[in-house]
Image (spheres, helix red, strand yellow):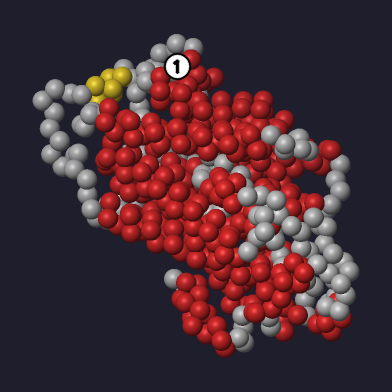
Amino acid sequence: MPFKNGLELTELQNMHTPEDDNISNDSNELNEADGHRISSKFIADRESRRSLTNSHLEKKKSCDDYSPGTTSIGMSVFNLSNAIMGSGILGLAFALANTGIVLFVLLLISVTLLSIYSINLLLKCSQETGCMVYEKLGEQVFGTPGRLLVFGSTTLQNTGAMLSYLFIVKNELPNVIKFLFGIEDTYRSWYLGGPFLLVTVTIGIILPLCLLKNLGYLGYTSGFSLTCMCFFLVVVIYNKFKIPCPYLIVNGTLISPQNATADGECTPKSFTFNSKTAYALPTLAFAFVCHPSVLPIYSELRDRTHEKMQRVSQISFFSMFLMYLLTAIFGYLTFYEKVGSELLGTYEDKTDVLLLTVRLAVIIAVILTVPVLFFTVRSSLFELARKTKYTFWQHLLVTVILLAIIDLLVIFIPAMKDIFGAVGATSANMLIFILPSMLYLKITNGNDSLGKERFWVSYLLHL
């Protein structure tokens, strides 16, 4: 799981890329600047953005500071795929069980296509304004309210991601420790409970990593996380053919009961509607959020063009679509209506070494990813407070308070579907659908030649 760790790239660029204070505030000075000698590539990049220009943007300070990218298309696809992949993959089988195969596939296709379309809108907005950071783009178009809205949405999204990752630690770490130390699964003790182990991991590992000023290990974490989820998919497919249906768990071991019947219990359903069906769309939206990472990845693309970045997004989303679809279908066909809101926790066989290996790998990946997301959230708070310099004690105090709040939420949240539902219905929808549409409509306001496209964007906004 990159586990959406591409999000911190947005914050790092926002923190370390100085704004160009010499850029003019009105269109007259821009015309004078055109007379100076600048690189032909910069001129082409600027001219291509004037296709949507309106007076609203011409009066604002531009964040146009062209810098050539160095990343290949292949590596950009890897980075964006890594940004898309997250803990949402663990909730897709549950979403399928509560919608049915046909309805789930239709929803998955719809969210995938709409996500690609919204990224296309985001790229057009970036092309027009020259902004390569989501927060700066919001400020460029809507001023301070736009900046606050983007900051709030990304902060809520990252907080939700951290909650889901630590929820995995709370649920899975006790099983791994019991297996590694040969402790009976029925043994109960406070020091082997999920809440205690969660707090221990937070204090012993996550807190020291959150206090680091340099997150240089991020690149290694990203590759390891994505590898873990590919391994997880292979194990899910393998266990579909290994686990019988119906099945029983006796003393932590999976068995197939004799004379068992599977009347309706092991029959896949095309359509399902119940009280939990409402969780499906927010879960899918949560699984596809990567938009704060799109612009930084675009800025690093070698010889970047709109079309080239579109190709990167299409390949990345199609790859994740296949991975999500296979995980959801094979997870559902293994447990059917018994699948849990967190697929990994549904595998109850505590003697399976392969499953324990997957659990351990995923736990390590999420523990290393949480500090990356935490860094983004904390930096956003300092940025909102306009506080660029702070003491070590202020740094420590904010870190401890935020981690304590997050741990308390994880301890008292009953199921991961609640995290997917709440965050997916709010910040995920805001980042994927609402904000790109609002930005595009504002930028193209008054451009009659784009009337048809503006109609479809307005339709997307009102869905």
Residue 163: quadrant of the picture: top right
198, 351: nearer the viewer: 351
Does the image show residue 141?
no
Q: Which residue is mark 1?
A: 179
102 to the left or right of 348: left
Q: Quadrant of residue 121?
A: bottom right
Q: Is residue 6 above or below residue 242?
A: below
Q: Is residue 224 above or below residue 161?
A: above
Residue at (72, 38) in percent of width and height: 215
Q: Residue at x 53, y 48 (%)?
A: 81
**Mark 1 crowd level (few <14, some 14–19, many ≥20, 10 Å Cα):** some
Residue 299 in sight: yes
Q: Position of residue 248 (x, y in %)?
A: 24, 26
Instruction: Check disc 1 and report its element: helix, strand or loop.
Output: helix
- Residue 321, horizontal then vertical, whole percent: 42, 51
The residue located at (65%, 79%) in the rendering is: 51
Image side of residue 288 versus residue 393, left or right = left
Nearer-the-camera pick, 349 or 198: 349
Which is more toward the observer, 207 or 138? 138
Left or right for 127, reference 165: right
Q: Position of residue 6 (x, y in %)?
A: 62, 47
Q: Amino acid at mark 1?
A: Phe
Residue that protrudes farthest toward the front in the picture = 40
Q: Residue 312, percent across and down?
A: 55, 55
Q: Residue at x 46, y 48 (%)?
A: 320
